[in-house]
Amino acid sequence: MLELIGRPWPWYVAGPLLGLLVPALLLLGGKTFGISANFRHLCAAVLPETRLKPAFLCYDWRRTGGWNLMLALGIVAGGFLATRVFGVPDVGQQIAEATRQDLQALGLTSFSGFAPAQVFSWSGLLTLKGFVAVAVGGFLVGFGARWAGGCTSGHAVSGLADMQIPSLVAVVGFFAGGLLVSWFVLPH
């Protein structure tokens, strides 16, 4: 196990650990895994208590969301420590050649970093296609996550582990939406 420190863990180690962590949290602490509610917790924490504060943000965020904010902080701190302190090597993107050709046919030619620079950059954001993909798409994802009662990771990892039917419906919807966009929207 010590030889795994300092480099990315293989899927067959990280996957089961994550899969065991969620049921353990559900059984032992009554907690659920999810990230999308943190924006609400953060807004409830920083906005002052006035008559102008929306009722949606008037709740005891320390009791219901304090631990979840710490989880999000731990994710950011863990990423920082992994890249800056422990020196995890840059493994680069491993994109199949067929996928690379499909992306090039869509006009994406930058394969350095984690996201294509043609879309995820200031110059890409100032184009109509970039604005729709990033700003409008980001709004729709955030709105959909709140409307569905949680994000993809919350429903897929935590909701399914808790055998919640609404999470199963949400996960099927996420996959169906992703497939429809990939095949019918993205090519245009």
Image (cartoon, grey):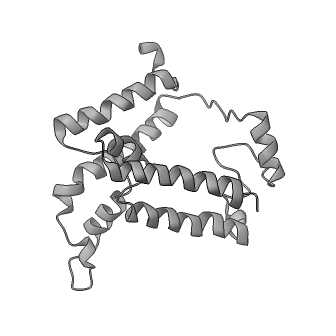
Q: Position of residue 77 (x, y in %)?
A: 40, 42
Vertical side of 106 occupied by 188: above or below:
below
Q: Position of residue 150 (x, y in %)?
A: 37, 56
Q: How many marks?
A: 0
Q: Is residue 131 left or right of residue 51?
A: right
Name the residue located 46 percent from the left edge and 40 percent from the top edge: 80
Vertical side of 82 occupied by 166: above or below:
below
Of residues 118 and 186, the one nearer the viewer is 186
Q: Position of residue 74 (x, y in %)?
A: 35, 42
Quadrant that contains the C terminus: bottom right
Name the residue located 61 percent from the left edge and 63 percent from the top edge: 134
Vertical side of 186 occupied by 93: above or below:
above
Quadrant that contains the N terminus: top left
Name the residue located 37 percent from the left edge and 31 percent from the top edge: 19
Q: Quadrant of residue 60?
A: bottom left
Q: Is residue 28 left or right of residue 37?
A: left
Q: Position of residue 159 (x, y in %)?
A: 33, 46
Of residues 181 and 47, the one nearer the viewer is 181
Name the residue located 21 percent from the left edge and 82 percent from the top edge: 50
